[in-house]
Amino acid sequence: MVGHQNTIYEATAPAAMYVAGILTHPAATTPRPFRDVPIRAALLSWLASTAYNASDEIAGRTEQHFPGFLAPGTIMAAFRDLRPMLYQAVSPFLRDGHEDVREAAVIAALILAEHPALAEHRDHLAVHARAILDTSGDGNNRRVAQKPLEVWGHDVPGSEPFLEKSWDWGPHSGGRSYIEPPF
């Protein structure tokens, strides 16, 4: 198992590294069956979802119930240490020509950028987050884009307050679902 209900497993890190490694492969531009969305968008969305499962919010909440969960050498700590490498794989797609790829890349990058080593990228990412707020019709993505702007101290003009809720990337969510295996 690679991931289930906000859980990072031993196989999650190698799977994420593999997905990050194939983002540039020409086959990643292949449209998904029954959708005019490149497979790359699904791969980026999976990375975003998985990164969220290791986010400060989720990991912190879990640490409260399971002390030591984030200790060095744990599966979660090892995965969280990969965030700068995953960001490097995601960032080339922040200006992709396909809207779904671009939006998925921005969402993944925003989540990954909470790693302290990526703080220097936050001002640049704020521009992309504002673009999501201005153009996206996906409520989950808009919530994800708004939160870092607020946390990083950026002004979020004209934004509506969003209800705090966990991502729902499952097959019964109201938004786009990239949960099916993209490869």
Image (cartoon, grey):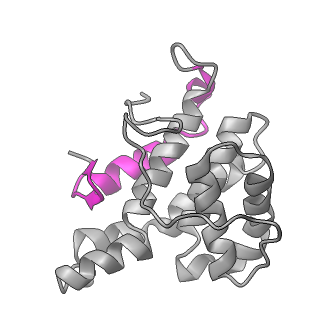
Q: Quadrant of residue 6?
A: bottom left
Query: Which one is nearer the viewer's eye here, 151 or 98?
Result: 151
- Estimate the x, y position of residue 77 in percent, counting from the top left: 31, 75
Q: Quadrant of the C terminus?
A: top left
Region of the chain picked out in magenta, as a range: 3-31
Q: Closest to the observer: 79 or 143?
A: 143
**Does residue 53 appear anywhere in the picture?**
yes
Q: Residue 155: horizontal and vertical position, in percent?
A: 79, 78
Based on the displayed image, in which of its 4 quarters is residue 152 positioned?
Answer: bottom right
Residue 97: horizontal and vertical position, in percent? 79, 36
**Residue 66 percent across, percent down from the top left:** 17, 80
Q: Is residue 88 visible?
A: no
Residue 168 relative to residue 153: left or right = left
Q: Please report the residue visible at 73 percent of the width from the left and 37 percent of the height from the top.
A: 99
Check the image and report above or below for 54 versus 27: below
Q: Quadrant of residue 96?
A: top right
At 77% from the left and 72% from the top, the residue drawn is 156
Q: Is residue 93 above or below residue 146?
A: above
Residue that appears at 61% across and 27% down: 38
Q: Work out which quarter of the rendered image holds the N terminus and state it.
A: top left
Q: Is 30 included in the stretch rendered in magenta?
A: yes
Nearer-the-camera pick, 73 or 150: 150
Q: Could you tell me which residue is drawn at 33 percent across and 57 percent down?
A: 13
Residue 76 lies in the magenta stretch: no
Q: State how many labels appear.
A: 0
Of all residues, the one furthest to the top in this rendering is 34
